[in-house]
Image (cartoon, rainbow, N blue to C red):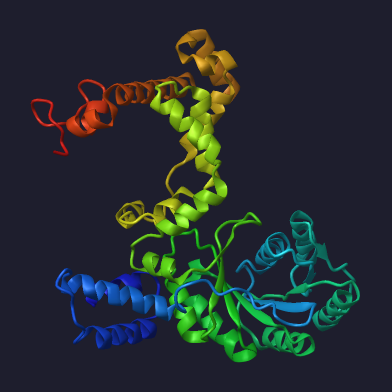
Amino acid sequence: MREVRLAMLDADVALPVVKDFVNKVKERAVGAEVLESISPGQAVAKIVNDALIDALGGAGAVPLNLSAVPPVPVLMVGLQGSGKTTTSGKIALRLSTRERKKVLLASLDTQRPAAQLQLAQLAEQAHVASLPIVAGQTPVEIAQRAMDVGRREGYDVVILDTAGRLSIDEALMEEVRQVRAVTQPAETLLVVDAMTGQDAVNTAKAFNDAVGVTGVVMTRMDGDARGGAALSMKAITGAPIKLTGSGEKLDALEEFHPERVAGRILGLGDIAGLVEKAADTLDHEEGERLAKKMMAGKFDLDDYASQIKQISKLGSISGIVGMLPGMGKIKEALGDKDLDTSILKTHLAIISSMTKGERKAPAVIKASRKKRIAAGSGTSVQEVNKLLKQFDMMSSMMKRFNKLGVKGLMRQGMSALMPKGMGGGPPGGGSPFR
C-alpha cells in the first residue's frame, strides 16, 4: 500500500483522495481469498487496479448526453488557458463527422481579445457554422441569440464557449450562472489542463459548487502528467470524465477510458490507447509495404523517409513512451526534457535534398554530392555522412536478418545482427540473452 500511495502522489492525485482510496483498497484486500495459482501480491495489484477503475467511473467511456430537444445546448466552462476554445472546436468536429450532427459554435467570451474570432476560425477548419459576431452584446444576449438561431435554422447542437479568467472570481461564476439559467444546457463540460495537477482540482470544486458540472474534459493528456488529476476530479465533482485532448490538432480528442488511465497512474502504461492511436493515424498498407522490403533487405532512403513521416504522425515521442509499460524509468531519467526528435527532421531534410537516384542507391553519393546535399538541406557534410553511415548499418542488419531467418536469430541472439566487433556477446560469440 505504501508503493501504491507513492505512485498515486507521484501521479498528482490529491492527498485526501489518496488516503480515502488506500483505505477502500485495504477493506477489500484484508480477508480476500487468494487463488492458489497467484501470489497475494498479484491479488492486491488486481484489487488496486479494479478500485482505481471504479474510482474513475467504472470501465468504459461515458458518451456526451445529447438526448434533449434540439438544439441541444452544451456549455463549456473553465479557466483561461485550459484549452476551452480549442476543445469546443474539437467537439464540434467530432459531433459533425462521427455523429452527423449539425453543430453551431458560439463564443460568449467578450473578455479576451479576438476570442470570438478564434472560435470562428476553428469553426471554419472543422467545417461547422459559427454564430456571427455582433459587437457590444453581453454573454447572456449572445447565448440567447445562439439558441434562437439554433431553433430557427434547425441545428442539432449549440456549443456555447464561455469566457475564462486567470483565476476563479465571483464575476466569472455569476456570468456562467446567468448563461446557464437562460440556456438550460444538457451538458456543462468543465475543461481542465491535466498538467496543472492539484490546481485543476480546486478549479473543479469551485465550478461544481457554483454551476454544477455534468462532465469533465481533460486537455494536454499527451504531456508528462500521468493522469492523477483525473482521479481527483472524479472524487471531488462526482462528474464523469468524458473526453481527453492530446494535441493542438482538431482531431486530437479521444473518449476517456478509466481502465487505461488506471494503468497510467500506476505506471503500467496504456498499450490499448497506443494501439488505437496507431490504428487511427498510421497507414497500414504503407507499413506492410515497408515491412516486406525490410524483410527482403531492399530498404532504401525513400523507405526510411516514409518511416520518419509515419512516426511523426503519432505526435509527441514523450507521449508515446508514456503509453508503454515499464518506460516510466526512462521518462524519469529524462526529467522535464522531451525526447530529442530533431535528428529525425534533420534526416528528412537531408533525404529531401537528394535526387531520386541517390535515394535509391546511396552508394553513388560521393564528396561533391555530399556538399550539394548539405547545402540544399541546410546541414553539414558531417551530418550527411552520419545519416549515410547509420543507414548503411541498418541495411547491413536487415541483410543479416534476412540471411539468418527467425530460427537463426533465436539460436544466435540479437548480437548476430550487429556488425563484427560490435556483438556485445560473451566470449566465444554466444548470445548475451541465452
Q: Is residue 135 left or right of residue 41?
A: right
Residue 67 lies in quadrant: bottom right
User: From where the camera sits, is residue 100 visible?
Assistant: yes
Q: Nearer the viewer, residue 283 or 225?
A: 283
Q: Nearer the viewer, residue 302 or 367?
A: 302
Residue 11 lies in quadrant: bottom left
Quadrant of the frame with the N terminus: bottom left
Residue at horizontal 35 percent and vertical 76 percent from the top:
50
Q: How many marks?
A: 0
Residue 24 in picture, x, y percent from top left: 31, 86
Residue 394 in picture, x, y percent from top left: 37, 26
Residue at horizontal 55 percent and vertical 45 percent from the top:
313
Q: Nearer the viewer, residue 70 or 18?
A: 70
Residue 404 in picture, x, y percent from top left: 26, 24
Question: Which residue is at the far left?
Answer: 427
User: From where the camera sits, is residue 424 visible?
Assistant: no
Residue at horizontal 66 percent and vertical 76 percent from the top:
165
Residue at horizontal 76 percent and vertical 85 percent from the top:
179
Q: Is residue 397 left or right of residue 135?
A: left
Residue 40 in picture, x, y percent from top left: 17, 74
Quadrant of the frame with the C terminus: top left
Can you say whether 57 is above or below 193 in the image?
Answer: below
Can you say whether 125 is above or below 393 in the image?
Answer: below
Can you say whether 115 is above or below 415 in the image?
Answer: below
